[in-house]
Amino acid sequence: MNLTTKILRSLSNATLGPRGALFIFHRMSRKDTWSQLLDNGFYLNESFMDEFLTYLSVQGWDFVTIEEAVHRSQSGDFSRKFVNFSLDDCYRDTYEIAVPLFRRHKAPLTLYLTTGIPDNTLALWAAGIEDTLMTRDRVELEEGPLFLTDHASRVAAFQALFSAWDENGAASRYARFCALNGIDQEAMHWKHAMSWEMLETVKHDPYVEIGGHTINHPHVADLDRDQAAHEIGGCLARITEKLGIPAKHFAFPYGRAKDCSARDFALARELGLGSAATTVKGLVYAGQDPMRLPRITLNGKHQSLAMMEAHLSGLTALAGSLKS
Ligand SMILES: [Zn+2]
């Protein structure tokens, strides 16, 4: 542990005392494939998370479910500091890497599932182009061929395609990309998606908690009220229908202040949810509104214990609130 980490830990424990921290991430990669990723901000390295979970345990943090985090904040039970990890969307690596790692640490992991992923109605286009650009030396675009000579050219190509396609007809562009490059879109989907069969095998795992993350991963604030209610309530109903378990915790896609509004927090309450989570940074204290839980996004480009202490001390949330 370096000096910065020690100083941040001492300061925050002395000044903040018991508190809750909710972390969110998306994908997890093994150490040996980490360097090949083209979008590593979207992943966490398994070996770093292994180190971080060990660190939290040694430092006396309780690992809790969202259900327990909400219970403690509602009842004012801050006798111990607690941390929850949630993972949004549900890619295949959730099942193959993240769940086993958290189970080894006896730490619950909350899976906020976008049901269009196991239902295969939502195109995982970013995963598909990343996979293709990582593994081929030449890809065909509508403008002509693109030659990929080294890692830097692959990263640049991914970033260019991602920003051109994001929220601009990505699904149909991806279908054309697959056709041009002879990619079996169905096979590529299951290479990166978590399936209902996988969810079935973990649904009773004491270290897995399953919640919802809409059907189609929209910006909920942009939908009309009926559509928003369908995306939130329909997703939770689908989980119960497929897995036979209650699902009452929810996370808003994207989750920033502009992605979920006061109307949506009220809607979550009216729909009878146990909680709804955002990605607005902050720590959890007594009296936290369960319909707008703050969460701290973990970015694979910033993996260090010093950065994690900055999160646990609320420093990064403070910096975020000063910027906005
Ligand atoms: Zn998401």
Image (cartoon, rainbow, N blue to C red):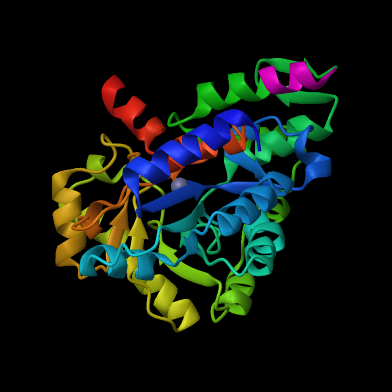
Q: Is residue 50 left or right of residue 200?
A: right
Query: Is 130 part of what is drawn in magenta?
Result: no
Q: Is residue 4 left or right of residue 98?
A: left
Residue 319, percent across and down?
A: 35, 25
Between residue 46 and residue 153, name the one nearer to us. Answer: 46
Q: Residue at x 33, y 45 (%)?
A: 16
| Count of numbered labels shown in the rendering | 0
- Above or below: residue 41 compared with residue 59: above
Instruction: State which quarter of the image contains the C terminus.
Output: top left
Q: Residue at x 39, y 64 (%)?
A: 66
**Is residue 183 in view from this perspective?**
yes
Residue 261, percent across and down?
A: 19, 43
Residue 236, percent across and down?
A: 36, 69
**Res 140 quadrant in image:** top right
Q: Is residue 63 left or right of residue 220?
A: right
Between residue 35 and residue 231, name the one nearer to us. Answer: 35
**Res 311 quadrant in image:** top left
Q: Residue at x 25, y 68 (%)?
A: 273
Q: Is residue 86 left or right of residue 99?
A: left
Instruction: State which quarter of the image contains the N terminus.
Output: top right
Q: Which residues are magenta?
A: 150-156
Q: Residue at x 56, y 72 (%)?
A: 207
Residue 78, percent across and down?
A: 31, 62
Between residue 278 and residue 285, name the one nearer to us. Answer: 285
**Res 40 quadrant in image:** top right
Magenta: main secondary structure equals helix
- Above or below: residue 189 compared with residue 307: below
